[in-house]
Amino acid sequence: MIYARKLVKRFGTKTVLRGIDFHVERGEFVALLGSNGAGKTTFLRILASLSRPSLGEVRLAGYSLPHQAAQVRARLGFVSHQPLLYGDLSAEDNLRFYARMYGLRKPEARIAEVLDLTGLRVHRREPVRTFSRGMQQRLSLGRAILHDPDILLFDEPYTGLDQDAALMLDDLLAKISAQGRTIVMTSHDLARTESLATRFDILARGVISASARRGELGGNLLDFYKKALAG
Amino acid sequence: MEPRLKSGKTAPAQRPQPGFVQTLFAVVWKDLTAEMRSRELLSAMLVFALLVIFIFNFALELAPSVRSEVTAGVLWVTFTFAGTLGLNRSMAMEKDRGCLDGLLLAPVERSAIYFGKAVGNLTFILIMAAIILPLYALFYGINVFRPGLLLVILLGSVGYTAIGTLLATMAVQTRTRDVLLPILLFPITLPVLIASVKASSGFLEKAPDLSAILPWLNFLIAYDIIFIALAFMFFDYLVEE
């Protein structure tokens, strides 16, 4: 479902990604872990078609980037630590706008469905700027799944959430993952990702330095993470 | 059922993608709805425009004989300064919560996003002009409701918004966006401002000389076409990184 080969990204003279090979099967939930500045966000932005790689090949859902970017975007949902929502619009208006941008055929029914899933139906007419961080992140997730994407990319979705909001997001992510979507999530929170992901990749020194499936870890993600970072 | 390729592999099914016009109207609808809810952008533009009119009116204390010569310049200074406020605010709205990424993630032609933003900005400038012009006529004692002058305001505003939206997209991605936009915008829009002032002055005269005004109108039309074409070509590259 996601295929990246020899991916390199340079910013001026600084090389952030040094030849990443990354492959994700349909329905997998991959946690992409790494220290600050490892290049996780840069990598995710390339997969989301928001940034171009300096070198290398990227394919998502059978379409290559950047040439078939529109087809990739139609099958992709992206959640970052920023909500990507308009503060002056209500929750419903935000979803209505994105429904138009994705050319949804029956937007009102889908918007109602997403508001129910995210538990925001009662707040649908309120401006997003009045929402708590947790509510904004749930709506952001609703925005990302509005067009029923096959692939979901999460960039540090737990940033700034309190414990209650994080638990609600856990619950939502588990529901969405159970729908068979392919998910890649970057996070610093090992405990959270351990309970959600089916595979764990460590990004260090600009490459995927280690990868393991949940069953191979023996329940100790922290050890695996430390060893991978130590190289 | 997903279609099969010659190689025997299954090709991914096509997803619906909105057309150019549908995208453009979606962006315009979003900008107008957000403004109706907040009223931040238009009110800031209007207050600023009114202040400029007041200040010029009392500072210059123009004699009726020279008013028509100076009025056009004051009018375009008002539009330009207030317009810059609007352009900055309009793009800041996209950047503040990462909304620009949200727009760029949609499976749409990116030039349609640009045109949507530009049409939204143009609408705000024209609404401001519609409110300012009667007050302007009142203060300066000049009839500004002349079809020729209204055409110049439309053409000048189109050119100003076309290049302004493009430069605001660039400026908003920097830390010094509030300062950078006017620094970039004013030199580039200087030709359109000169042409607009000259054509407006011509139409404000008691007996407009069309042969003198026409070259400025043609210049405005050419400027509008060139900058709309440039924006169409470069917007995609500008928002990529």
Image (cartoon, rainbow, N blue to C red):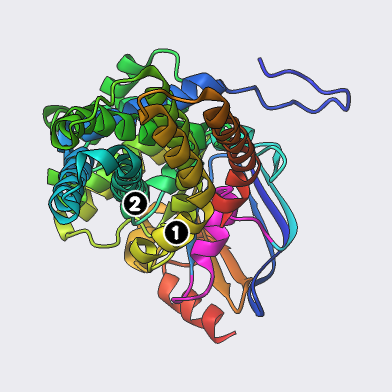
Q: Chain of mark 2?
A: B
Visible residue check, residue B43: yes
Q: Are marks 2 and 1 in contact (CB under 8 Å)?
A: yes
Residue B181's x, y, as percent? 41, 58
What range of the chain is rendered magenta?
A: A34-53
Q: Is residue A222 left or right of residue B223?
A: left
The residue to which callout 1 is attached is: B171
Front-lying residue, B172 or A197: B172
Q: Residue at x 57, y 61 (%)?
A: A43
Q: Is residue A65 left or right of residue B103?
A: right
Q: For the residue carrying disc 1, how many other residues have a C-alpha within 10 Å: few (<14), some (14-19), or many (20+)?
A: many
Q: Quadrant of the C terminus of chain A?
A: bottom right
On screen, B19 above or below B35?
above
Residue A225's x, y, as percent? 48, 75
- Secondary structure under the numbered disc 2 in the rendered image: helix
The residue to which callout 2 is attached is: B88
- Secondary structure under the numbered disc 1 in the rendered image: helix
Q: Residue at x 47, y 26 (%)?
A: B24
Q: Chain of mark 1?
A: B
Q: Quadrant of the N terminus of chain A?
A: top right
Residue A149's x, y, as percent? 49, 33
Asked if the stretch drawn in magenta spans residue A47, the answer is yes
